[in-house]
Image (cartoon, rainbow, N blue to C red):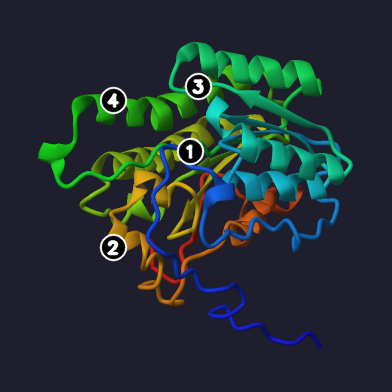
Amino acid sequence: MSPLNDPRTLFPTVDPPEQTQPEPGLDRNLQPPADLGMDSYVGHERLVGRRALITGGDSGIGAAAAIAYAREGADVAIAYLPEEQPDADVILKAIGDAGRRGIGIPVDLSTLEGCRKVVADTVEALGGLDILVNNASRQIWHDGIENLPDEDFDLTMRTNVYAAYRVTKEALPHLQPGSSIIFTSSVQAYDPSETLIDYGITKAAMNHLSKSLAMELTPKGIRVNAVAPGPFWTPLQPSHGQPMEKVTSFGQASPLGRAGHPAELAGAYVYLASDEASYTSGSTLSVTGGRPTP
C-alpha cells in the first residue's frame, strides 16, 4: 500500500520575502521558486499525438500544464509576451527533453492581430490543434475602484477576456470532435478581493464563457471546461498582482495553510484535456486549497 501524503506538507510552504518584479514578472526571479513539476511530474501517455496551444505557457500555471502535456505525449505551443522569453526558453527545453515538439510564440494577445497570429502559427507548426488552454492573464492590484484607471481596466479586459474569446474563435475551425477547450478561471470569480476588481470580473467571465461554449460545442463533440485555482505562487503575485503585505503571507490563510504550487494544478489540466474526462463538459474544476466554491 502506498503511504499517505499529508497535503499540508506535500509541497513546501511559500514564505516569500518582500519582492517586486516589473509586470509581467518572470519565474526565474521568483523567491522562493515555484514548483512547476519539472522534477516531479511523470506522464502516463494520456495525450499521445495531441497538439496543444497554451496561452501564458511560459511560467506559472501555464508552464506546469505545458510540461505535463509534453510528458503525456502532446506537442505543445506556448504563447507569451516577448519580455518573457527567458522563462519560455526553459519550458521549451523541457518540452523537447520530453521528446515532444515545442513551439514558442512571442505575441501580444491584447490585440486582435496577436490572437489571429497565435492560432495560425500553432496550426502551421504543429499541423493542427486539438487542445486549447486559455490561460494568459493580467493581474494588477489597485486600492479601490477610484484608483483603478480606465486604461488599466481596459487592458485587463483585453488581455483576459477579449483574448480568450478571440483565440477560441480563431481556433474553432481547426478543432475536431474529441478536442478540448480549457479556460483558467479563479477563486476570485466566487470570492473576490477588493483590490482585484477588474481581475475578478474577468475570471467570472471565464466561467460564463466556458459554460456558454459548452452548451454550443458539446453536441459537436468538443468539450469545454474551466479550472478555478485558488492562491497559487506564480510571477503574477510579486509583479504588482498583490499588495506587499499579501505577497509576504501569500496563501497562508487557506485551509491547507499554504499557497499552491503550479505543479499541483497540472493534473487538472491533463484530466480535462484527456479522454478520461470524456463525459465532462461545462464544468469548473476548483483547485483552491480547501476554500469552498459553488
* Residue placed most toward the observer, 110 or 293: 110
Q: Is residue 58 left or right of residue 129?
A: left
- As drawn, the label of residue 35 is none
Q: CA distance from mark 2 to mark 1?
A: 33 Å
Q: Secondary structure under badge 3?
A: loop
Q: Residue at x 78, y 40 (%)?
A: 93
Using a 10 Å C-alpha cutoff, classify the residue at mark 4 as few (fewer than 14 neighbours), some (14 to 19) or many (20 or more).
few
- As drawn, the label of residue 154 is 4
Residue hosting label 2: 245
- Looking at the rendered structure, the kind of residue marked 4 is Asp
Tags 1 and 3 touching, CB below 8 Å: no
* Quarter occupied by residue 83: top right
Q: Residue at x 59, y 48 (%)?
A: 28
Using a 10 Å C-alpha cutoff, classify the residue at mark 2 as few (fewer than 14 neighbours), some (14 to 19) or many (20 or more).
few
| Earlier residue among tags 2 and 1 | 1
| Earlier residue among tags 4 and 3 | 3
Q: Residue at x 47, y 66 (%)?
A: 259
- Looking at the rendered structure, the kind of residue marked 3 is Asp
Q: CA distance from mark 1 to mark 4?
A: 21 Å
Q: Secondary structure under badge 4?
A: helix
- As drawn, the label of residue 108 is 3
